[in-house]
Image (cartoon, rainbow, N blue to C red):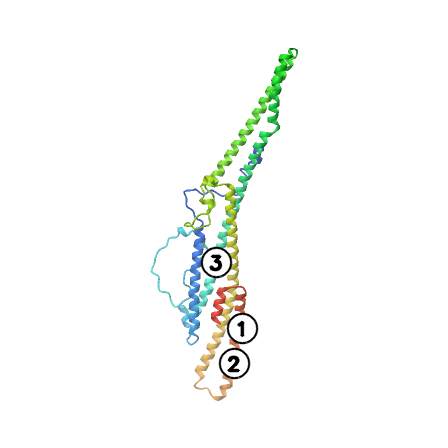
Amino acid sequence: MVMSILLPYDSGQERLVPLPPDVAVHHYDSFLHIERQSRQLQRDLQTLLDAQSTGLAAGLSRPTGDDTTSNGSLTPTPTPTQLGSNPRNTITIPVRQPLQKKIGLRGARRGILKAMHALLSLKEEERRLIDSELKNRRLAVKEVETFVNKQSGLENAIAEIQTNDGSLRAENLIREARTLETDIRDLESKLLQMKVRHRHVLNEVSQIQNSVDAQLSSYKASLALVQTDVNNYLRSPPIRPLVPPTATPPPFYALNPDRRTLEMAKEQWIMEQNELRSKRRKADLEIEALKEGGGVWQKVVSNISSFEKLLQREMRSLQQGSQFRESRDEESNIAKRRTVLDELDDTTSQLETSLQLAEQKSWNLLICCIGAEL
């Protein structure tokens, strides 16, 4: 009854499966894959920003039809399924890559938006991976606490058995038995009564001693089993460190398995929990910025495109009618120019408002893009 209370082995709670020591599993590979994808997207964004600057510098002196030479995509956009797979299981087949087409201004703008969506998907996958690692460490901390509670309960039970009234009573009865033996020799008339009492006392001593020995043996065996489980658990912990395979492992993992303790394991995984929470907060901030910033950039591109269409339409009208225009059309031309200037002021004001919002929220990507448009 006591054993079942102190040692709830079959509690039904979720437990981590220890990883075999001869299998090299590095969970950091997933984070490394995400980091590489993120760097690639950042390089693509820089290329698109350069293409945007080149297109803006070229001005509106030529038609924008050549923007269709490229859709702004420099690299394949990773899907969540691809990001969640193990990069070590991917077979890379080298192929001859065609020369990249020149990216026009419109293609660069579309490419920037597409890269934002790809980076958003990548960060959401990173957040899911972080949540999974956090869950594993919460389970590991619970298992460590369970082992600590089992050890403490068994040690307290053993100490209580060794110091309870049963042991003291056995010692007192032994002394009483010796006294009775002396009384038997001194009081022959009470020999029969004393012998009966003597046998009774000896039997009781034997029963108590056997009971104490049995309890101690049971609890000591249970403690040995728990200690074996603890040693196996610490020798092959179910959590791998969040460091690259080539980096120096944390002190807990670098330590000889025989010298590891449950307190060290708990401290290590609590520290990793804090690191993962910090990464998750950073990923949440980037996701929020990409979601909101994407909408702002779409609005900016829409405003610029509307103004450019108006400007091109008016310029074509002026060029086509310049040879046949009479003096009475001068007022009409002035009105058209004023309309273009008013639309330019309105578009510039909207871009400046969006730029101020980006600066307030420290959206460096939008600051760069909108600043280039201005």
Quick one: label 3 or label 2, which is nearer the N terminus? 3
Going by the numbered disc 1, the residue's amino acid type is Ser
Q: Is residue 276 above or below residue 235?
A: below
Badge 3 element:
helix
- Return the residue found at the far top: 189
Q: What numbered label is drawn on residue 74?
A: none
Report the residue marked by disc 3.
Answer: 121
Distance, label 1 to label 2, CA atoms, is 16 Å
Q: Is residue 101 left or right of residue 128?
A: left
- Assess whether mark 2 and mark 3 are in contact (beta carbons under 8 angstroms): no
Badge 2 element:
helix
Going by the numbered disc 2, the residue's amino acid type is Arg
Report the residue marked by disc 2.
Answer: 338
Distance, label 3 to label 2, CA atoms, is 45 Å
Q: What numbered label is drawn on residue 349?
A: 1
- Assess whether mark 3 and mark 1 are in contact (beta carbons under 8 angstroms): no
Going by the numbered disc 3, the residue's amino acid type is Ser
Label 3 crowd bin: few (<14), some (14–19), many (20+), radius 10 Å: some
> Is residue 38 at least partly visible in the picture?
yes
